[in-house]
Image (cartoon, rainbow, N blue to C red):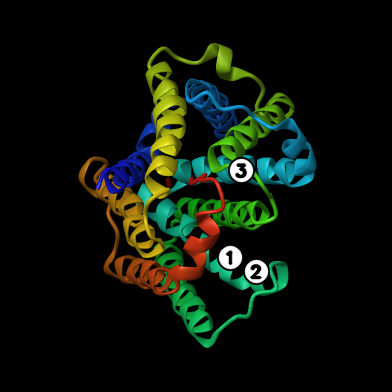
Amino acid sequence: MKSKIHFILSMIIFGTIGLVVRNIDLSSSERALLSSFLGCLFLLLIFFMMKKKISWKIVKSNALFLILSGIALGGNWIFLYQSYDHTTIANATLGYYFAPVFVMILSPFVLREKLSIKKMVCIGVAIIGMLMIVGEGVSSSSSEDILGLSFGLIAAAFYAALLLLNKFIKDMGKLEMTIIQLGTTTLLLIPYVFMTSGFGIFEVSGSSIPFILILGIINTGIGFWLFFSGMEKLKGQSIAMLSYVDPFVAILISAMILHEQLTIDQMLGGALLLGSTIASETNFIRLSKQSTKILSKQ
C-alpha cells in the first residue's frame, strides 16, 4: 500500500508540472536547466543519506548512452515546456503521451522486438486519436495550438528516445542512473542556454523564484524519488494503470484551474490515444521500469 501511495503521489506531482512552468518567466531551455540542476542536487542528497555510492567504473562503461540519454532528457524538457507556452496543458499532455506509440514503432528497429498485430492496431488507433486532437486545432485556425501540439510531439519523441537509450544502460540502479542523467543534462544545457537564450536566470523576477524551487525540488527531485520508491514493489499492470493519474491531473488542472477547454472531438481523440496506450501497456511498462522518468507532463 505504501508503494502504491508513493507512486500515485509522484504521478500527481508530475501532473502539476504544466501549471508550475506557466509561472516561470524564463525560456524553456533555462527552465529545463534549473529543473535538472536542482533535481540532481536533491537526489544526490537523498542518495548520500541512503549511504550509497556511485560506481564510476560502471558510469564509464555506460558513458556513451548516458550522454545520449542526457541529450534526450534535455530535449524532452525543452520542447515539453515550449508546448505548455503555446497551447493548453491538456493538449500538451495529450501530445506528450504519444511517446509510447513512438516506442512501439521504433522497438522493432532499435530493440529487435517483433511488432504484433495488437501493437499495430494500438498504433493505428493512437494515430487516429492524435489526428482528431490536431485536426480540431487546424479547423479552428489556432496556429498557437498547432505549434504547441507539435512541440509536445517532439518532446514525446525525445522521451521515447530516452526510454530506448536507457535499455542499453547496464548494471546501474534507477536512482543512480537518474542522478547521472540529470547531471549530464545540466552540463549539456549550460552551453546550449548560453548560445541561445542567454542567462536570464540571473534577472528572473521574484515571483518566479518559488515556482523554480517547486519545479526543481518537488516536481523533479521529490517526484522522481517517490516514483522510484513506489515503483520498486508494484507489478507492471499496477504501474500501467496508475501512470494515467498524471494526464488525468494535468487535464483536470487545465479545465478547473486554468479554465482551458477541450472540444468534444479532442476529448474523443484523447480517449482513443490514452486508451490505445493502456491496451499495449505491458511492453511499454517493462521498458519504463528500466529507465528514469523523466516525464516529463508532465
Q: Which residue is mark 1?
A: 103
Q: Quadrant of residue 262?
A: bottom left
Q: Amino acid at mark 1?
A: Val
Q: Secondary structure at mark 1?
A: helix
Q: Secondary structure at mark 2?
A: helix
Q: Amino acid at mark 2?
A: Leu
Q: Is residue 119 above or below residue 216?
A: below
Residue 73 is labelled as 3
Q: Position of residue 2 (x, y in %)?
A: 27, 43
Q: Is residue 118 above or below residue 5?
A: below
- N-terminal label among 1 and 3: 3
Q: Which residue is mark 2?
A: 106
134 displayed left or right of 291: left
- N-terminal label among 2 and 3: 3
Q: Are marks 2 and 1 in contact (CB under 8 Å)?
A: yes
Q: Is residue 259 visible?
A: yes
Q: What separation in Å lies between label 2 and label 1 (alpha carbons)?
A: 5 Å
Q: What separation in Å lies between label 2 and label 3 (alpha carbons)?
A: 18 Å
**Label 2: how many Cα within 10 Å (few below 14, some 14–19, many 20+):** some
Q: Is residue 55 above or below residue 170?
A: above
Q: Residue at x 57, y 71 (%)?
A: 104
Q: Amino acid at mark 3?
A: Leu
In this figure, what is the number of numbered marks?
Answer: 3
**Label 3: how many Cα within 10 Å (few below 14, some 14–19, many 20+):** many
Q: Are marks 1 and 3 in contact (CB under 8 Å)?
A: no
Q: What separation in Å lies between label 1 and label 3 (alpha carbons)?
A: 15 Å
Q: Position of residue 109 (x, y in %)?
A: 71, 72
Q: Nearer the viewer, residue 143 or 61?
A: 61
